[in-house]
Amino acid sequence: MKANQPISFNRPDIIRPPSEWRSYFLPLTSGCSNNTCTFCGYYGSKLQIRDITDVKREIDAVALFIRSGIRVPNIPKVVYAVAQDWDGKRIFLQDGDALVYPFPRLREVLHYLNEKLHGLERIGTYATPQDILRRSVEELREFRQLKLGIFYTGLETGDDGLLQQIGKGVTSDEVIEAGKKVKEAGISFSVTVILGLGGIEESKKHVLGTSKVLTEINPDYVGALTLTLVPGTPLHEQCERNEFHPLSPFHSLEELKSIIENSSFSDCFFSSMHASNYLSVRGKLPHDKERMLKQLEKVLAAQDPALLRPEFLRGL
Ligand code: SF4
């Protein structure tokens, strides 16, 4: 490679929250800036920031395709594969934490999206608490006005000891502060927690800490995932060395039930619809609390594996 030649951007695979399935996926970054979480497939990933000219070229290509069906050369095939089924309403910014994209450039991209894609209703992104805390409420409000309407943030656990063990790089207080900032800016806040993250030994602490922090944040959405050990990650290695003891599927459902029981929300859509879960439970809290708990109690009482998603159908 010649000196000063720009390194080409490695377009990331599409990893997105379940609720963004209808979105167009626009990569601004590749990897994650906080690549230290011991359970995560982004562990050790190298963050790449995509050149804004390249981002705008893709937006132009999508806008032209939506308007007139014309495909321009030298645009990755995946752009058109996604754009052909897209309804023009939502965009999801990739990758692991696209909010790390430098502020003036992210603002410029948002302006450009609004200018070129007129039917756009909402833009969403993954955001680490660290990314959120770096921005002021005024900056977040500016994003909101440009239709950046939802942040998806991994709390994973509310227990501080566990947060430290998994290399999350933040405390529960910092996640709470980040959540409050997002809500103050009028942006919807969606939080994920991971069932089984503390293994058998830390299960109780995990459930209690998580319920406490969820109650404090009072997010608009909570998505429960179930821990899936990813080969190559430190947690997988710990498990291989018998230092981490994963939960059984039914134990993970007990955690789910306890989190629903012990948290309190004013108006939250809570779900375990993600493909990693053994059982899909969903509803508005507090309204559907009793129904959701009854559903879980029934399955827990039966202890019948046939009621659970089979292991081979679980996904990340
Ligand atoms: S869990 Fe989130 S913050 Fe941690 S490495 Fe994965 S994508 Fe990055």
Image (spheres, rainbow, N blue to C red):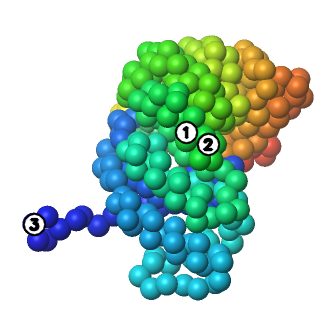
Task: Please say if 65 is above or below 284.
Answer: below
Mark 1 burial class by Cα count in 10 Å: few <14, some 14-19, many 20+: some
User: Which residue bears the numbered disc 1?
Assistant: 142
**Which of the two labelled residues, at mark 2 and mark 3, occupies the earlier sequence position?**
3
Q: Residue at x 76, y 42 (%)?
A: 280
Residue 289: horizontal and vertical position, in percent?
Answer: 85, 24
Residue 217: horizontal and vertical position, in percent?
Answer: 63, 20
Tag shown at residue 274: none
**Left or right of 243 on screen, residue 158:** right
Q: Quadrant of residue 54?
A: bottom left
Residue closer to the observer: 303 or 254:
254
Dot 3 falls on a residue whose secondary structure is loop
Tell me if residue 276 can be seen: no
Q: Which amino acid type is shown beneath numbered disc 1?
A: Glu
Mark 1 and 2 residues: CB-CB less than 8 Å, in contact? yes
Ligand 1 under 8 Å from disc 1 Cβ: no
Residue closer to the observer: 197 or 163:
163
User: Which residue bears the numbered disc 2?
Assistant: 145
Q: Which amino acid type is shown beneath numbered disc 3?
A: Ala
Mark 2 burial class by Cα count in 10 Å: few <14, some 14-19, many 20+: some
Image depth: mark 1 or mark 3 in front? 1
Q: CA distance from mark 1 to mark 2?
A: 5 Å
Q: CA distance from mark 1 to mark 3?
A: 38 Å
Tell me if residue 164 can be seen: yes
Q: Residue at x 68, y 21 (%)?
A: 218
Q: Residue at x 60, y 30 (%)?
A: 185
**Which of the two labelled residues, at mark 1 and mark 3, occupies the earlier sequence position?**
3
Q: CA distance from mark 2 to mark 3?
A: 41 Å
Image depth: mark 2 or mark 3 in front? 2
User: Which residue bears the numbered disc 3?
Assistant: 3
Which quadrant of the rendered structure holds the N terminus?
A: bottom left
